Amino acid sequence: MKKLRFERVPTHIPGFDKLVNNGFKKRSMNLIIGGAGSGKTIFSVAYLVNGILKHNEPGMYITFEEKKEELYENMSEFGWDLAKLEKEKKFIFLEYSPERVKKLLVEGGGLIENIITRYNIKRLVIDSITSFVLLYQDELTKKEAALSLFGLLRSWGCTTLLTSEKYIVNMDKVEGGGLEFEVDSIILLYHVKEKGIRKRAIEVLKMRGTKHIEKTLKMEITGTGVTIYPNRIVIFKHEEND
Amino acid sequence: MKKLRFERVPTHIPGFDKLVNNGFKKRSMNLIIGGAGSGKTIFSVAYLVNGILKHNEPGMYITFEEKKEELYENMSEFGWDLAKLEKEKKFIFLEYSPERVKKLLVEGGGLIENIITRYNIKRLVIDSITSFVLLYQDELTKKEAALSLFGLLRSWGCTTLLTSEKYIVNMDKVEGGGLEFEVDSIILLYHVKEKGIRKRAIEVLKMRGTKHIEKTLKMEITGTGVTIYPNRIVIFKHEEND
Amino acid sequence: MKKLRFERVPTHIPGFDKLVNNGFKKRSMNLIIGGAGSGKTIFSVAYLVNGILKHNEPGMYITFEEKKEELYENMSEFGWDLAKLEKEKKFIFLEYSPERVKKLLVEGGGLIENIITRYNIKRLVIDSITSFVLLYQDELTKKEAALSLFGLLRSWGCTTLLTSEKYIVNMDKVEGGGLEFEVDSIILLYHVKEKGIRKRAIEVLKMRGTKHIEKTLKMEITGTGVTIYPNRIVIFKHEEND
Amino acid sequence: MKKLRFERVPTHIPGFDKLVNNGFKKRSMNLIIGGAGSGKTIFSVAYLVNGILKHNEPGMYITFEEKKEELYENMSEFGWDLAKLEKEKKFIFLEYSPERVKKLLVEGGGLIENIITRYNIKRLVIDSITSFVLLYQDELTKKEAALSLFGLLRSWGCTTLLTSEKYIVNMDKVEGGGLEFEVDSIILLYHVKEKGIRKRAIEVLKMRGTKHIEKTLKMEITGTGVTIYPNRIVIFKHEEND
Amino acid sequence: MKKLRFERVPTHIPGFDKLVNNGFKKRSMNLIIGGAGSGKTIFSVAYLVNGILKHNEPGMYITFEEKKEELYENMSEFGWDLAKLEKEKKFIFLEYSPERVKKLLVEGGGLIENIITRYNIKRLVIDSITSFVLLYQDELTKKEAALSLFGLLRSWGCTTLLTSEKYIVNMDKVEGGGLEFEVDSIILLYHVKEKGIRKRAIEVLKMRGTKHIEKTLKMEITGTGVTIYPNRIVIFKHEEND
Amino acid sequence: MKKLRFERVPTHIPGFDKLVNNGFKKRSMNLIIGGAGSGKTIFSVAYLVNGILKHNEPGMYITFEEKKEELYENMSEFGWDLAKLEKEKKFIFLEYSPERVKKLLVEGGGLIENIITRYNIKRLVIDSITSFVLLYQDELTKKEAALSLFGLLRSWGCTTLLTSEKYIVNMDKVEGGGLEFEVDSIILLYHVKEKGIRKRAIEVLKMRGTKHIEKTLKMEITGTGVTIYPNRIVIFKHEEND
């Protein structure tokens, strides 16, 4: 028997792709979990911008909360000119209410699918999935809705990043609203204080069909986006084990 | 009085069978509890594939969430060609909604039973039981439904693995939704960080009528599936006792 | 004033009877609390089997969940031939739904009482009481139902063991669903990990009218049942105090 | 201004009275909080029996759960012949349902008051108040009912002990169902493990208008009841402070 | 710009006034939070009695639970003759149900206001506010009711102490039912065990417009009331930081 | 690509502006989270007063709870003459019920917008947002209302501070009622005890589009307001990591 070789979608985020065998799996659903200020949006936009600049792959950013102008302003800090990319039809910004996504699930997602087809979108970011999850009351309907959404997303054929607004306090207790069992990969973004200084770290918790690095690594937000240091293992106090 | 000698169903997962007196008890119900990325699916599919390849025992994989194509792709990473086994009628993939299982309990399970009989299924995996458990609101109906389901499963005569999506944070507080008191065995899959590196471990918490190893042992996901190291006891920080 | 000398019902479980002044109090209600795999069923059946073999006292095992065949199979591991004892009318197996117990409380328990009288049952095990407790929603009705059940049980005149499915994580916070204040004794079965190896221990938390040993002692499941080591105090990590 | 000298009701429990300025305040309401096996019933009955034997003060024991025969049997262990004291009209045993107490609050408590007057009851024990508290759903009605009950109890003029079934895990977080703010004193009975051996201790948490000892002291259940060791401070692990 | 100099209301409780710039702010609302036996009532009554004796300022004590006779008895322990002060129209005792306070909020508080005017009340104690807070179900109506009550209290022009029945376990997590954000000051009374001995301490958590001492200080209940030791910092175990 | 240079709004709070690249982003929404006594109001008013005195920028203070007179009195402690600034039409005090804000969201905010336009308000403080958040029951409507409010606030064009009443116990678990994911920046105010002395600290948890200092720094309330010490890192006990 021969192994299937998954096609990979590199992020070109310095230090990241090597952790996961050269990038996300093509057409996969990937969950980025982190608290406020952990860098979810920067990570996600870097993924899209690098797709455009290095692979000429158009990307779409769907959001329930971010305002376009502010996002563009904030991202300019990293040298990313989203307005220009938008004019070139490479970067599509879509503000969308959670209710409309809900409706989408019933109707079949025509509008977004049209955009994806017309602009040949390859990379998709939904920032964040949390408001969508809040629409559903009990755990079962939540799980069912997530399954429907994931079905829709898969039918679009993009490689998708979903961000989830959660503080990761205890690293052994990741709660992603039940989504973490359906997605193809889970990336954890830590933002934890040590000796009075808050630090960032990243961990690939799972990636289906991929032998990935199982270390929690230092991550920094720099002037040009996000950088990961594959040789800098980050140990938080409550997991010391000497 | 003489002891009854239970028939055993070996998993052929390297290192596992010795822990439990040569395998699962024939016709038993076994609960595999673990969080996202802990290796539940790989463990379960290894059990099925080994049954086919080493014993020519057909196996069925019932899932509420996994997509066939993706599962097949992901499992190919370990050298398992599920599509080929499916064509040979040795591996049966069944996507099934929790609601249909619920209905099954009322009607008596004809459809699945037919498949089991027709293909002579010996090994059964339900991955995962969590969505099914979510269908029931209170603890009593949950327990009753589990008892009904287990009754049905036993009537089919397979040796069954049920996976449960739970993070095992505190090793002394395993919550399996009440199922853990009804099943014949409980296998815990740990995925816990130590000094910034996430590690896997396995423990047989109980196995009725079986003198099993009571150690928590190192487990790894390798290129060929899952491997257990019977001589490598894993000690987590919060249970140190010196 | 002279002390009343309670009649005692020895379990003949090696090491146990000395802890509690030669056995359970005659006609008492005793609660065995432990998690999955802690040995509640083996302890309870040992109590019944020893009653039959050493005192010729018939015993009854009422269960809501265990299947007779499987119980018999599992217990054969310890050299106990329950099928043979059943044929000799010494061991009575009764599968009973929680709802029927509920009904029993209203009607007065005729059926079971008849069996007890006919077979001269002296030792009774209810394994487990948990499903029964789940039938009642609020704490008060739960307590009232327990009082009714206990009234019924006392009227039958047996020496009774009730098992309760609870993990005993924190040894100072035993939750028995409110039952622990009504019963005559509470036996805790621990199943806790230390340095990667799960160990068993037993503690007599209370026994009314009895000066009992207040130590937590090593317990093992052996080829012949349960053994307690009265000289082996077990100290769990979180209660160290030096 | 001169201090009022409260009349004191000694318990004659060895070591206790000195802690609280020679005994409970006359006509006071005193809450004894402890878990299963902590010694609440033995402490309470000792208080009543000593009142009878040393002061010729009749006592009443109101219970919602204990059976008379069993209580008498259990207490005989300490040399207390309650049946004899009952025949002499010194010890009154009253089994009473929580609902009847509820009704009592509406009607004004004639029946019990009659008994108290007829037998000249001076010492009263309610063992335990927990079932009564469970009758009320929300915190406010619970508090109001407690205030009504306490009003009734005060009108009877006895010195009263109320037991409450609570495990005292964290010594700084005593939850007495809101009662602890209304009573005149709170006595805590600890039953905590240390190095595998369960030990007893007692603490007077508050006593209004009384300068009491603020230490947690060793308590033992002996062949003659309860003994307190005023010179043996008990330190639990989680309050060490070196 | 010149600072306004708030008028101060000294408590004359030994050691306290210096902590808070010579006393409570005139006409302020002050919350005293502490558990059972922490000394809330003694602190509050000392505040009233000292106002009468040292400043000839009449005081009112509104309670939902304390009985007058018992309060007077208990307070006599500290040499305070409340009955005499009451006869002199200096000390007003008012037993008041929470429901009546609720009604008061709707009607505007005529009755109490009349008393305040007639007796020229300057110092007011409400002991305790907890039952009042229980009247309201959700957090918003609770907060609104508190705002109404505080508006009423402010209109009366007294300097007010409100006691709140809470155990202060974790000093960084003070829960005062939402009241703590509306009041002018918060005083915490600790009653915590150390090495088996319970000790008292006091802390001024906030006082608006006042530069107060930010230390937790030893407090004792003595024969003459409450004493605070401004030079004795109390360190609890869980806040050590060496 | 060139970076956009955000306009900055300096607070002139000693030590603060340097932490955040010279001040808040112009027209941004900034969340100040802290417990009772942490200094939220002083910080916010300092921001407004400094805007008036150093930049001649009028400011508005919207509150749901603070009384004008008391606020003015309390703030006079720091040398701030709010009454005078109000007369000069530089400081606008607006007491506003949460319900009216709710109504505002539906109607579009005409009244406040009029004030902002008429007085040319540049700096806005809402102290606190907590009561507003309490108006909404479930997390989704809460988030939607916050988004509406933020839309309104952005349309007004002010640089806004919102205070939130939360104790920050665990620095890795900041709960801002879901608001923390929508705002442009989060400032944490700590008020934590160390060795019996309560201390203040400040941390900028996130600021979009801004490279900010990631340290927790000493903060003090002084005679002239708030001062931050950029060289004094504050380490709380539970984050030590040596």
Image (cartoon, coloured by chain):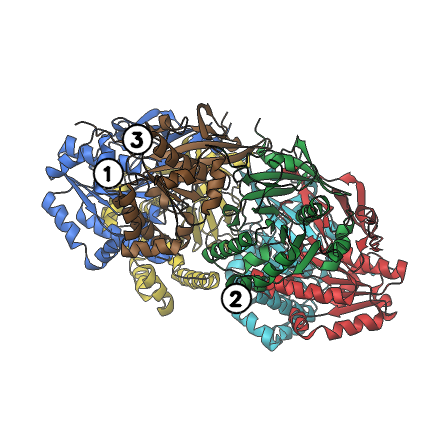
Chain colours: A cyan, B red, C green, D brown, E blue, F yellow
Q: Give the quadrant of residue D51.
A: top left
Q: Which residue is mark 1?
A: E71
Query: How many other residues sit within 10 Å of disc 3, few (<14), some (14-19) or many (≥20)?
Result: many
Task: Give amino acid for label 3.
Answer: Thr
Mark 3 belongs to chain: D
Of B175 and D58, the residue lying toward us: D58
Q: Quadrant of the N terminus of chain F?
A: bottom right
Q: Which residue is mark 3?
A: D210
- Are labels 3 and 2 on one chain? no
User: C191 above or below A75?
Assistant: above
Contact? badges 3 and 1 (CB < 8 Å)? no
Residue D113: give its label.
none
Cβ–Cβ below 8 Å for labels 1 and 2? no
Q: CA distance from mark 1 to mark 2?
A: 54 Å
**Above or below: residue A174 compared with residue C9:** below
Q: Secondary structure at mark 3?
A: loop
Q: What is the distance, in whole Å, between disc 3 and disc 2 at their CAs? A: 57 Å
Residue B100 is drawn in which quadrant? bottom right
Q: Nearer the viewer, mark 1 or mark 2?
A: 1
Residue extending furthest top? D231
E137 or A101: which is nearer to us? E137
The image shows residue C92 at horizontal and vertical percentages of 69, 56
Task: Judge by depth and name the residue closer to the eye, B169 or B66.
Answer: B169
Q: Which residue is mark 2?
A: A135
The reply to whether residue F88 is in sight is no
Q: Amino acid at mark 1?
A: Leu
Q: Percent from the top left, x then y, of residue D231?
A: 44, 22
Judge the density around disc 1: few (<14), some (14-19), many (≥20) Cα neighbours within 10 Å. Answer: some
